[in-house]
């Protein structure tokens, strides 16, 4: 996980509609940048729907939500459509940004060890600095916690 007080690495990734986004285009805006393991899974769906439900309040506090996983653009589009999500989902199939943000880690699940995305949320300020970092995210609670942090 990247440290609080460090500059968030810039990136360019494709969203669910095929549009390229960079972190630098959000300069002047707070960014909730969250990394999640997989589209259309239970925890990831709870987290995404929670952010979507709170979007009006998040936007009123001058922030945007960006979700990143290694899923494809097509998978993101289906996820967005299935749950009527109202924010940007970014595709990182080569895990370049995922690794840059230090969220690709060894995970243990039912005794099995594998590599994967550790659910992590960063809050990035208007100047591009990391002001909050959490890698102990509870999917269902994260959207409300982030709204309170804003």
Image: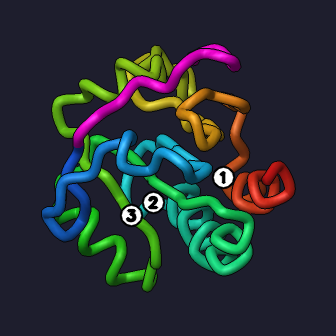
Q: Where is residue 58 in the image (x, y as percent from the top left)?
A: 68, 68
45 left or right of 61? left
Circle nearer the viewer, 1 or 2 = 1
Residue at the location (53% across, 33% down)? 128
Quadrant of the snapshot with the N terminus: top right
Q: Disc 3 and disc 1: Cα gap in Å?
A: 17 Å
Confirm whether the magenta stretch covers residue 2.
yes
Which residue carries the number 3 mark?
88
Q: In which quarter of the image is residue 41?
A: bottom left
Above-or-below relation of 16 to 4: below
Circle nearer the viewer, 3 or 1 = 3
Of 132 and 95, which appears nearest the observer?
Answer: 132
145 left or right of 80? right
* Secondary structure type for disc 1: loop
Determine contact: label 3, label 1, CB under 8 Å: no
1 left or right of 80? right
Q: In which quarter of the image is residue 125?
A: top right
- Residue range highlighted in magenta: 1-12
Q: Disc 3 and disc 2: Cα gap in Å?
A: 18 Å
Q: Earlier in the sequence, mark 3 or mark 2?
A: 2
Determine contact: label 1, label 2, CB under 8 Å: no
Tag shown at residue 139:
1
């Amino acid at each position: 996980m990247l440290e609080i007080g460090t500059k968030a690495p810039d990136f360019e990734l494709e969203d669910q509609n095929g549009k390229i986004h960079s972190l630098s285009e959000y300069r002047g805006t707070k960014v909730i940048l969250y990394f999640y393991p997989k589209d259309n899974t239970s925890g990831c769906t709870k987290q995404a729907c929670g952010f979507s439900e709170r979007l009006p309040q998040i936007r009123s506090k001058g922030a945007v939500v960006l979700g990143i996983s290694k899923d494809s653009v097509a998978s993101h589009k289906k996820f967005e459509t299935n749950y009527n999500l109202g924010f940007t989902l970014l595709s990182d199939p080569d895990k370049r940004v995922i690794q840059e943000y230090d969220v690709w880690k060894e995970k243990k699940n039912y005794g099995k060890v594998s590599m994967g995305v550790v659910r992590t949320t960063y809050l990035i300020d208007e100047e591009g600095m990391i002001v909050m970092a959490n890698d102990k995210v509870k999917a269902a609670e994260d959207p409300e916690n982030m709204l309170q942090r804003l």
